[in-house]
Amino acid sequence: MKVYFKIKFGSSQNKIESFGGGRYLVYMTMKKEDSGAMATMINLISKQLCAEPKNIKYLGKRGEGNLEEHIFDI
C-alpha cells in the first residue's frame, strides 16, 4: 500500500495528522539536514500505521519545496 507524507520540519513536537486516502502531514522536531531525520520519520510512520519499521520502504518524492511529498510503501 502506498502512503504519501508532507513533512514540516522544525516543529515543536513530533506528530502525524491523517487526511484520509493514504495522505498524512508529519510534524518533525528535526531539521531536514539532520542525519537521523529519515530514521525518525520511519519510526513515526511505524507507530501511526502499526507497521514494522523493516516493512516500510521509501519510494522517493515528488514535487519541490513546500509542495514536496514523500512516498512510502507499507
Image (spheres, rainbow, N blue to C red):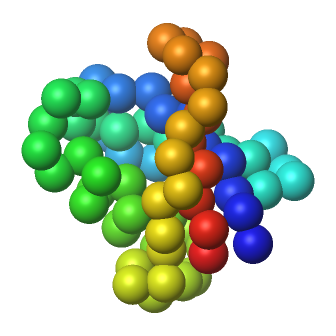
Figure quadrant of residue 12: top left
The residue furthest left is: 35
Residue nearest the observer in this picture, 37 or 64: 64
Question: Is 41 located above or below residue 74 in the figure?
Answer: above
Residue 44 can be seen, yes or no:
no
Would residue 47 appear left or right of 11 to someone viewing this image?
A: right
Residue 37, compared with residue 1, is above or below; it is above
Please report the residue visible at 14 percent of the width from the left and 36 percent of the height from the top: 34
Q: Nearer the viewer, residue 65 or 26?
A: 65
On the rendered image, what quadrant is the C terminus found in?
bottom right
Question: Where's residue 52, x and y in %?
Answer: 46, 87
Number of callouts: 0
Q: Please state if 30 lies on the left or on the right of 47 as rendered.
A: left
Q: Residue at x 35, y 39 (%)?
A: 28
Seen from the viewer's position, the closer of residues 23 and 58 is 58
Locate residue 50 relative to residue 7 in the image: left or right.
right
Q: Residue furthest right?
A: 21
Q: Is residue 32 above or below residue 45?
A: above
The percent position of residue 3, horizontal first and vertical second, equals 69, 57
Q: What residue appears at the point 54 percent right and 56 percent down from the top-left corner?
A: 59
Q: Is residue 50 left or right of residue 53?
A: right
Q: Position of residue 37 (x, y in %)?
A: 24, 46
